[in-house]
Amino acid sequence: MFLVYGIVYRYLCARKLEKMKKNILSFIVLVAVIFSACAQQKKTTKSKVLTAQGTNLTIQSMAMERTPCFGNCPSYRLEIYKDGLVKFKSWSDTEFEGDYEKKFDAVKVSELFRQFEAYRVDTCAEAYESLIQDVPGINYYFTYKDKEQKIMNAHFGPTYMIQMAEETDKQFKVDASWTKTADKKKD
């Protein structure tokens, strides 16, 4: 009888030990993957910064869209041109409804374009997978001397895309000094 208990006890201990080994091995693999991903990300960031200085791409114009959500999220399009002209088109839930435009200093616009160029937006994916359905999105459209580029769902891309959207909104916020060019179109 004790022999049977001894065999069963050893069997159960061996199974627990095997499970523990698998858990420890899984944990080690997970940690290794995380550290290698972080190390790879740092390498990528450094190389992007270094190659940004050698680029010949120059942004001629850009557009940024804030897409609607199921609630009351502002939805609009900002078009920014190299000469300083900025156009605003409201789609929904904005303080100023309709189409507006304003001429800004071309230096201010070129500084914004240089920030985008320094981040090497020309290397971004055309679209990022939308991970959440009811989120107001950010889409970008860039025009260069010899090509056009769009970046859809940029808010799920690199974090600087969200930061640059906030910077663009801050610099080109519509107020009473803008000229209204058209009323909002009825749906």
Image (cartoon, helix red, strand yellow):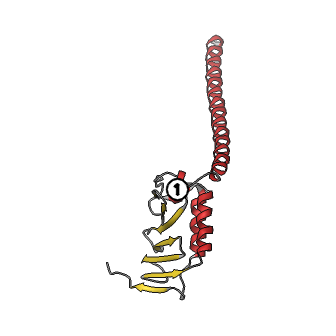
Q: What element carries label 1?
A: helix
Whether residue 60 can be seen here = yes
Whether residue 170 can be seen here = no
Asked if residue 102 is positioned above or below residue 60 in the image, the reply reads: below
Q: In which quarter of the image is residue 167?
A: bottom right
The residue under the point 58% across, 54% down is: 120
- Taking the image as shown, residue 168 lies to the left or right of residue 145, namely right
Where is residue 168? Give x, y as percent.
Answer: 57, 70
Q: Quadrant of residue 134?
A: bottom left
Question: From this viewpoint, which residue is outermost toward the left?
Answer: 187
User: Disc count in the image?
Assistant: 1
The residue under the point 44% across, 77% down is: 90
Mark 1 residue crowding within 10 angstroms, few (<14) / some (14–19) / many (20+): some
Type of amino acid at the residue the image marks with label 1: Phe
Where is residue 55? Give x, y as percent.
Answer: 59, 52
Asked if residue 153 is positioned above or below residue 103 in the image, the reply reads: above
* Quarter of the rendering occupied by the N terminus: top right
Asked if residue 97 is positioned above or below residue 77 in the image, the reply reads: below
The residue under the point 38% across, 82% down is: 184
Asked if residue 64 is positioned above or below residue 126 in the image, the reply reads: below
Residue nearest the viewer, comparing 40 with 14: 40
Residue nearest the viewer, comparing 146 with 111: 146
Question: From this viewpoint, which residue is outermost toward the bottom?
Answer: 176
Where is residue 15? Give x, y as percent.
Answer: 61, 22
* Quarter of the rendering occupied by the C terminus: bottom left
- Disc 1 designates what residue? 156
Residue nearest the viewer, comparing 29 with 18: 29
Where is residue 22? Give x, y as percent.
Answer: 62, 27
